[in-house]
Amino acid sequence: MPNTPLDHARQRYAEHGVDVDAAIAAMDQFPVSVHCWQGDDVGGFESAGGELGGGLAVTGNYPGKARTADELRADAEKAYSLIPGKHRFNLHAIYAETGDKKVPRDQLAAEHFAGWIDWAKSQGIGLDFNPTCFGHPLAESGMTLAHADESVRRFWIDHCRACRRIGAAMGQALGAPTVTNVWVPDGTKDTPADRKGPRERLADSLDAVFAEPLDARHNLDAVESKLFGIGAESYTVGSHEFYLGYAAKKSAAGQNVALCLDTGHFHPTETVSDKLSAVLQFVPEVLLHVSRGVRWDSDHVVILSDENRAIAGEIVRGGYAERVHIGLDFFDATINRVAAWVIGVRATQRALLTALLEPTAEIQRAEAEGDLTARLALMEEHKSLPFAAVWEAYCEQEGVPVGRGWLDEVRDYEKNVLSRRN
């Protein structure tokens, strides 16, 4: 007879052909890239940036926002201490540390991220990176890489090219490829008379951005689509169809440009879980931004939703661990920012562990035999298998709090650290 909840879970899962300990061990295949911008409301450290813009908006003003790179790193370390496993950290270009010198975005270099690289080494984690094509005077029109003015386009091309080099330098220094993701806010509030021209310009600009060969061991390029944004409700230049075609075209030409699928960047009736196996037929790799849109792309903190579980199930069933790079993308300033990180990552990990514990072979065998009754019944039965005991065992193994214990630590951190920043 099982003596502990974990023993009971092992027995119940074994009845369905699932090895609990193998599932826990497999969690190492799924590092999550934790996004820096949740820690300071997409503020960054640029000395003279414009308003956030780009269809982006952060709501709330919870006390204790990180004001410096050191504070942001300390907050991230606290979050990591409460999350099982080893993960990554995702930076935007506006998080450069340039000292007292103002460095234009098109002139940023790896030296301006030396502090982040040294910190990542000390933490034993990898870094990911993004050009920042918003919050700047040259982005106020709503167009960047698709701008009609060649000089404006050139600025943003040079910025994105600089960011690719920075990403490659990060990857080389840390011994793991940096995913450098290009997202631009380009679009219009009302219906355009010319949809073709901006997309032609965007394609040409991207070709210029990706023209320089970089070592794939150090950098992986990605492009990110969006349905719409504030101020760009009627037309988004970089739509899903545009970037899917662009990434597939690059792949056919022998250049790996990953397609970023952000779970908040589609119509509410679309699901990214259904898109993964489709787009991975034609592009080598996918960058997955896990978010939670409520009615629209409102970037709520990730929870263990049905869609989050479905996405994790597709990644595991498809054997996509090496082809799907998982990162978070939300910003909520109505709650404790460190807690938001912990909630989001742990929810994503629970979804992945649930998928690893699914009796997939049993379910797929029923499907292959045409027994659709058994397929549905087994999928439903899986939902009530004793997952919680396995999750708690994983947390204990990794030396992080089980259950709500992590929340007490965040509250202590808020009392002793965050509250003193006001």
Image (cartoon, rainbow, N blue to C red):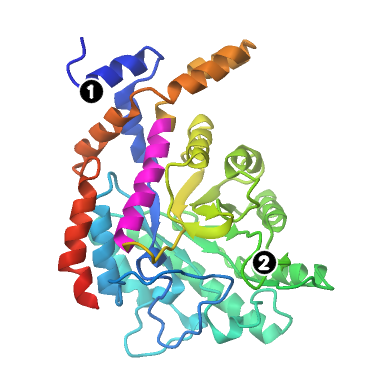
- Secondary structure beneath label 2: helix
Principal secondary structure, stretch drawn in magenta? helix
* Residue at the spot of label 1: 5
Furthest toward the right, the residue is 193
Q: Nearer the viewer, mark 2 or mark 1?
A: 1
416, 318: nearer the viewer: 416
Residue at 67% from the left image edge and 70% from the top image edge: 232
Q: Tell me the kind of residue under disc 2.
A: Asp
353 with respect to 367 (left or right): left
Q: Which residues are magenta?
A: 337-354
Q: Is residue 346 magenta?
A: yes
Q: Tell me the kind of residue under disc 1.
A: Pro
Q: Return the x and y of residue 113 as percentages of the image width and height.
A: 36, 73
On the question of residue 18 being in view, the answer is yes
Where the C terminus falls, by quadrant? bottom left
Residue at 71% from the left image edge and 84% from the top image edge: 149
Q: Give me the disc on residue 44.
A: none
Q: Return the x and y of residue 138 as percentages of the image width and height.
A: 60, 84
Q: Return the x and y of residue 152 as percentages of the image width and height.
A: 65, 84
Q: Residues within 10 Å of mark 2 (few under 14, many from 20)?
A: some
Residue at 33% from the left image edge and 90% from the top image edge: 100
* Residue at the spot of label 2: 207
Question: Marks 2 and 1, Cα distance to the nearest angstrom?
Answer: 55 Å
359 with respect to 185 (left or right): left
295 with respect to 303 (left or right): right
- Residue 281, quarter of the rendered image: top right
Furthest toward the bottom, the residue is 101
- Secondary structure beneath label 1: helix
Q: Residues within 10 Å of mark 1 (few under 14, many from 20)?
A: some
